Image (cartoon, helix red, strand yellow):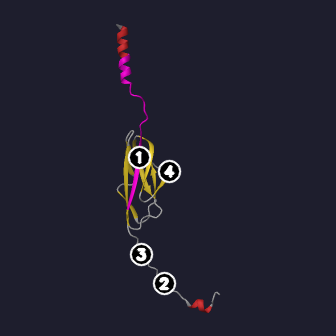
Amino acid sequence: MAKLVALLLLSALAAACSEPLVPRIGDVRLTVATTGADLDPDGYAIALDGGAAMAVAVNDSKMISGLSAGSHSALLNGLAANCTVSGANPRDIDVGSHETTEVRIAVICAALPPLNIAGVWDWTEQYVNPVC
């Protein structure tokens, strides 16, 4: 009888621990969409969890693979003075295990004011002291 109880206990333990230990990782696809006028000519930088920033164009998508499942944060910076991020920045991201989480970041750029160059030029200097 003791052998039967031990066998049942071992079977119950084996069934309870049958799920293999698999790393809980996921991916994030960050998509930046910029609208408006006078778009930022050199693009932006995205940093995930305060890490090293990676360059991203004004209308671009980046895949970040192998992230641990759970909460992360994406910060878009390097914006021109006339551009702003629509919504929260940094953006909170919840990465699911073995899933690709889609994150869309919208940037709106306002038109820059036209350059107005005004001044007075004295062209007489060229005739009084010719360079040639």
- The residue mark sitting in front, 1 or 2, is 1
Rendered image quadrant of residue 116: bottom left
Distance between the alpha carbons at the discs numbered 2 and 3: 16 Å
The numbered disc on residue 114 is 3
Provide the secondary structure element on which disc 4 rests.
loop
Gap between marks 1 and 2, in whole Å? 53 Å
Earlier along the polypeptide chain: callout 4 or callout 2?
4
Occupied quadrant, residue 9: top left
Which residue type carries mark 2?
Gly
* Badge 4 or badge 3: first in the primary sequence: 4
x, y percent for residue 93? 38, 47
Left or right, residue 97 beside residue 131: left
Residue under numbered circle 1: 28
Between tags 3 and 1, which lies in front?
1
Give the residue type at disc 3.
Answer: Pro
Along the viewing direction, whichever of 18 and 73 lies nearer the viewer: 18
Q: Are marks 2 and 3 in contact (CB under 8 Å)?
A: no
Disc 3/disc 1 C-alpha distance (Å): 39 Å
For mark 1, give the secondary structure.
Answer: strand
Looking at the rendering, the stretch of residues picked out in magenta corresponds to 10-34
Residue matched to label 2: 119
